[in-house]
Image (spheres, rainbow, N blue to C red):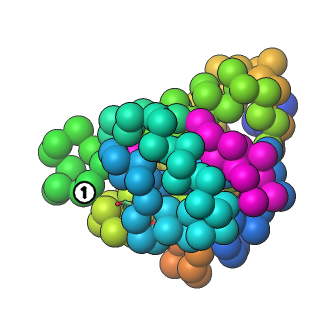
Amino acid sequence: MKDLQINQTNLRLAKGDITRCEVDAIVNAANESLLGGGGVDGAIHRAAGPELLAACRLLNGCRTGDAKLTPGFRLKAAHVIHTVGPVWRGGTHGEAELLASCYQKSLELAEANGIRTLAFPAISTGIYGYPLDRATAIAVGTVRTYSENHPQTIITEITFVCFDDATFRAYEQAFEESERGTD
Ligand code: AR6
């Protein structure tokens, strides 16, 4: 299963590099400094150009679970939403709530800025070590609940961009479990 239609919003899965996505906004899995890093953060800064770092410097960082907006500069996406996922520390340090908050705050920021199409990477599942199956369940669950609770949303398309096959399979399973949960 690669698609879920919830009210106005199509949730979909794609494989590949988020920096190449032709959407209104891509989400960056950043750190609290917002001054760049490795993983998807490094790739986004390289593709957007040095103007992105200059814009991020003006934001005074970002708390874990929160989200901030910049232009996309040289990216095809007009905007970047920078969010900071939790570092996995065993699951007893509020990680699930913080990860859900990343998705929720990113969606609220998108909505407030007229963003209709949005692409997420699998936040926290790389360098920050969040278990993939748990992280994808939270990602799909939070986005689905948002779409159910906002039937008039302007956000028509939300893509989960998977950089590798294991991530793609974890999202497919999360989509299927999410559908089963509504039977
Ligand atoms: N497109 C889509 N997904 C990608 C790409 C890409 N170009 N590159 C990597 N991924 P990570 P985190 C996937 O480590 O765990 C940075 O240093 C990757 O395979 O980028 O939230 C920040 O500055 C994985 O599935 O982010 C922070 O310090 C997912 O993106 C820290 O890493 C997230 O992996 C954040 O760690």
Residue 87 lies in the magenta stretch = no
From where the camera sits, is residue 121 visible?
yes
The residue lying at 64 percent from left, 47 percent from top is: 80
Front residue of 159/137: it is 159
Residue visible at 38% across and 34% down? 60
| Residue lying at 72% horizontally and 52% vertically, measured from the top left | 73
Query: Where does the magenta region start and end?
Result: 69-84
Q: In front here: 129 or 46?
A: 46
Above or below 7: residue 29: below
Asked if residue 171 lies left or right of residue 98, the reply is right
**Secondary structure under the numbered disc 1 in the rendered image:** loop
Please tell me whether residue 163 is drawn above or below residue 129 in the rendered image: below
**Percent position (x, y) of residue 78?**
78, 46
**Which quarter of the figure has residue 3?**
bottom right
Q: List x then y, in percent, for residue 104.
A: 52, 32
Number of residues whose C-alpha sits closer than 10 Å to that of mark 1, classed few (under 14), some (14–19) or many (20 or more): some
Work out whether residue 53 or residue 33 is closer to the camera in this orientation and state it. 53
Is 71 magenta? The answer is yes
Q: Is residue 176 above or below residue 153?
A: below
Residue assigned mark 1: 88
Q: Decide: is 151 above or below 18.
A: above
